[in-house]
Image (cartoon, grey):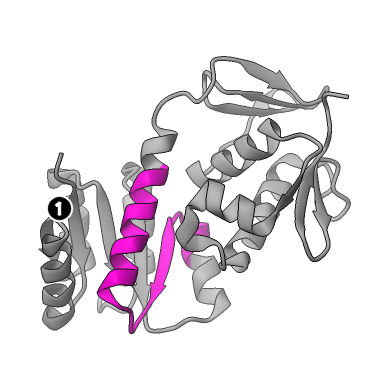
């Protein structure tokens, strides 16, 4: 089935460049030149993924992303000319699925789009019909795709859930950074250790009683992470 991608950028040349290369890869492509048009097209067309520029007049990419996230679960890749960590963190905090810094190659963008779409596809069905009680305060219900802390559901981004799922499925095992990135994000991300650190931080903030003194996710310096061996 052909995937529909929405490109949002106020620069016609950039939209043409992205459109041409995505169509060559077999994607169906539509365009929006500003944030308001993007929100309307997301609602009307329900694309499989949105490629969203940050630097736009009136309603910038971050504001547009926030509006999209209030209503629509569509995955979003942000485009920016700035590569600072603060910009990436802001986009990820607002719910972006990935970040590509301009200038970029068509090959890189296509690779990132395919990786995000694979992650969404893997997250769609229930991954396991069972509930795992890590201890008396943390449970993961794979059938309902629900994480409970002290009996209360905790809202998780899809990527946070996939990362926690991988940890819970491998209790007590030392998981290298490369292994985690490849398994949770895809092989294209094996060098992106920054995004792994960010999401481990996000997870700790949501499930740890004291994120600065982890009870569940332990850092193995220079190698990767280890989840508590709750099956011993």
Instruction: Tell me if 20 is positioned left or right of 217 in this view.
Output: left
The answer to whether residue 43 is above or below residue 194 is: above
Residue projecting furthest to the top = 130
Residue 225 appears at what percent x and percent y?
A: 76, 51
- Whether residue 227 is visible here, answered yes or no, is yes
Q: Quadrant of the C terminus?
A: top right
Q: Please state which of residues 202 and 99 is positioned toward the viewer in this rendering.
A: 99
Instruction: Tell me if 72 is positioned left or right of 38 in this view.
Output: right
Residue 158 appears at what percent x and percent y?
A: 49, 42
Q: Which residue lies under the disc numbered 1?
A: 41
How many numbered discs sit on the rendered protein? 1
The residue drawn where x is 44% and y is 35% is 123
Residue 96 appears at what percent x and percent y?
A: 43, 58
The residue drawn where x is 48% and y is 56% is 187
Instruction: Tell me if 75 is positioned left or right of 227 in this view.
Output: left
Which stretch is magenta? 91-119
Sort mark 1 into few (<14), some (14-19) or many (20+) by Cα contacts within 10 Å: some
Secondary structure at numbered mark 1? helix
In the rendered structure, does residue 115 fall within the stretch colored magenta?
A: yes
In the rendered structure, does residue 205 fall within the stretch colored magenta?
A: no
- Whether residue 59 is visible here, answered yes or no, is no
Q: Please state which of residues 180 and 137 is positioned toward the viewer in this rendering.
A: 180
């Amino acid at each position: 089935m052909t995937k529909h991608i929405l490109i949002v950028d106020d620069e016609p040349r950039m939209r043409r460049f992205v459109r041409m290369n995505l169509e060559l890869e077999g994607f169906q492509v539509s365009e929006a030149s500003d944030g308001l048009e993007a929100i309307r097209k997301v609602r009307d067309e329900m694309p499989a993924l949105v490629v969203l520029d940050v630097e736009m007049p009136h309603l910038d990419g971050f504001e547009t992303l926030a509006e999209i996230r209030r209503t629509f679960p569509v995955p979003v890749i942000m485009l920016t000319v700035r590569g600072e960590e603060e910009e990436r963190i802001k986009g990820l905090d607002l719910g972006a699925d990935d970040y590509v810094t301009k200038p970029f190659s068509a090959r890189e963008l296509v690779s990132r789009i395919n990786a995000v779409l694979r992650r969404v596809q893997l997250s769609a069905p229930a991954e396991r019909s069972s509930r795992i009680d890590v201890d008396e305060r943390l449970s993961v219900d794979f059938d309902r795709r629900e994480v409970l802390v002290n009996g209360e559901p905790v809202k998780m981004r899809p990527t946070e859930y996939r990362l926690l799922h991988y940890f819970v499925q491998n209790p007590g095992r030392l998981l290298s950074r490369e292994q985690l990135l490849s398994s949770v994000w895809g092989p294209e991300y094996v060098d992106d250790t920054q995004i792994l650190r960010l999401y481990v931080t996000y997870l700790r903030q949501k499930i740890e009683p004291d994120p600065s003194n982890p009870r569940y996710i332990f850092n193995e310096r220079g190698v990767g992470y280890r989840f508590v061996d709750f099956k011993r």
